[in-house]
Image (cartoon, helix red, strand yellow):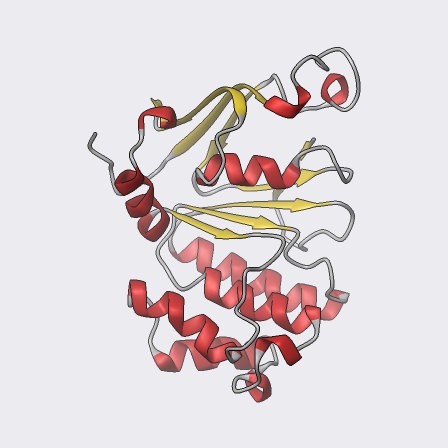
Amino acid sequence: MSITRKIDKITLSELLPRVFDGMQHTAPVSHSGVWLKDIELVRGRRYRVYAESGTGKSSLCSFIYGSRRDYLGTIRFNGTDVAGYSLSDWSRLRTRSLAYLPQELGLFSELTAMENIMIKNRLTDFLSAQQINQMLEQLEIDNRADYPAGRMSVGQRQRVAIIRALCQPFDFLLLDEPVSHLDERNNRLVARMVAEAADAQQAAIVTTSVGNHLLLDDVTTLTL
């Protein structure tokens, strides 16, 4: 299957985690604005998926990213059902079109902040060392660049993981609770960086939240 460089639209049709099968007429499914609905996510726009814990927000990100397939319904990229994608297809998409920050961050605790970032950037060769240093300064963690991630606070680790997520080209940026441990000031620093990176590539942002929202403007909210 030929995979195009740009994903302009992601369509969710009657999507439902398999764990919720049989619960179609009960909460949380019956109250959802996403599950069992027809949803279009369009490149260039910004979306917030607001959810209570346990309603499947992390599952939604994993389904779109292709790391989990335990769902009913259909996900289409530019009209093509992703169920037919091969591992090599997904590998190309994850380096060219889809960027993802999981809630658990996925940093290597024994490696420094810079080493964690460079693992990704060496694969993509997307940012220069100067750009990465500027991003560390912008998020005010440049003085932690040589600290092991395991010795950093959760908020500092979130900022490192956000920089790492931006070390690639993307059409859709998936951020699962990216600022859950950040105060408003650091939230705004992250929001500005993420918005600038997405706007430069005319990309979409899809962020999830259980309460502490990434402070973006012009956001379409979907309630899970």
Whether residue 48 is visible: no
Q: Which residue is nearer to you in this view: 152 or 124?
A: 152
Is 115 located above or below residue 68 in the figure?
A: below
Residue at the extreme left = 2
In percent of width and height, residue 165 lies at 47, 60
Q: Quadrant of the N terminus?
A: top left
Q: Which residue is nearer to you in this view: 86 or 167?
A: 86
Q: Residue at x 31, y 50 (%)?
A: 96
Q: Residue at x 39, y 46 (%)?
A: 171
Q: Quadrant of residue 172?
A: top left
Q: Quadrant of the C terminus?
A: top right
In percent of width and height, residue 156 lies at 65, 73
In percent of width and height, residue 70 lies at 53, 28
Q: Residue at x 77, y 40 (%)?
A: 53
In percent of width and height, residue 182 lies at 73, 65
Is 123 located above or below residue 32 in the figure?
A: below
Whether residue 133 is visible: yes
